[in-house]
């Protein structure tokens, strides 16, 4: 696998460089579109994607540049944007599998935000990267 880009993904995209094995698993179950990087929703049809995070970092989940010194307002803004999209009320009429996936995604976002908001937890996480 080649080196990962440290540039943040474009707004609305939660991206990372995936290996070819990870790419094969990231196919939309709704329309079949292949995604080479993790996404919460299919970019082609909007379907909820599987919870296959692979090596996606907390920074990448939130669409933030990987750096220790974070602007917490950026973290909070990214969190609010994602929680609007992942809120259970938005998916109340969806099938049970989509509701479960949205719940898993929301929990993963909560974990990422809790880690990145705390300087101590962020330092420990940074050392694991």
Image (spheres, grey):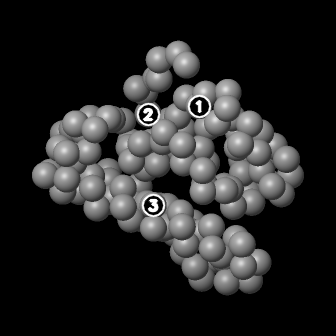
Quarter of the image that includes the C terminus: top left
6 lies above or below 57: above
Q: Secondary structure at mark 2?
A: loop
Q: Is residue 42 left or right of residue 51?
A: right
103 lies above or below 25: below
44 lies above or below 6: below
Q: Secondary structure at mark 3?
A: helix
Query: Total label count?
Result: 3
| C-alpha distance separating marks 3 and 1 | 19 Å
Q: Position of residue 92 (x, y in %)?
A: 67, 83
Q: Which residue is drawn at the image coordinates 72% and 51% (left, top)?
A: 42
User: Label 2 neighbourhood size at 10 Å, few (<14), some (14-19), many (20+)?
Assistant: some
The circle on residue 108 is: 3
Judging by the rendered image, the residue that carries numbered circle 1 is: 18
Q: Which residue is drawn at the image coordinates 43% and 60% (left, top)?
A: 109
Judging by the rendered image, the residue that carries numbered circle 2 is: 8
């Amino acid at each position: 696998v080649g080196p990962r880009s440290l540039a943040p993904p474009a707004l609305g995209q939660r991206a990372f460089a995936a290996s070819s094995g990870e790419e094969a698993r990231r196919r939309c179950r709704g329309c079949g579109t292949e995604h080479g990087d993790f996404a919460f929703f299919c970019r082609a049809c909007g379907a909820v994607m599987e919870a296959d995070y692979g090596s996606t970092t907390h920074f990448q989940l939130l669409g933030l540049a990987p750096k220790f010194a974070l602007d917490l307002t950026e973290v909070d803004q990214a969190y609010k944007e994602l929680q609007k999209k992942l809120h259970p009320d938005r998916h109340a009429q969806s099938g049970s599998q989509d509701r479960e996936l949205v719940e898993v995604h929301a929990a993963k976002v909560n974990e990422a935000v809790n880690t990145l908001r705390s300087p101590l937890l962020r330092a420990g996480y940074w050392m694991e990267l």
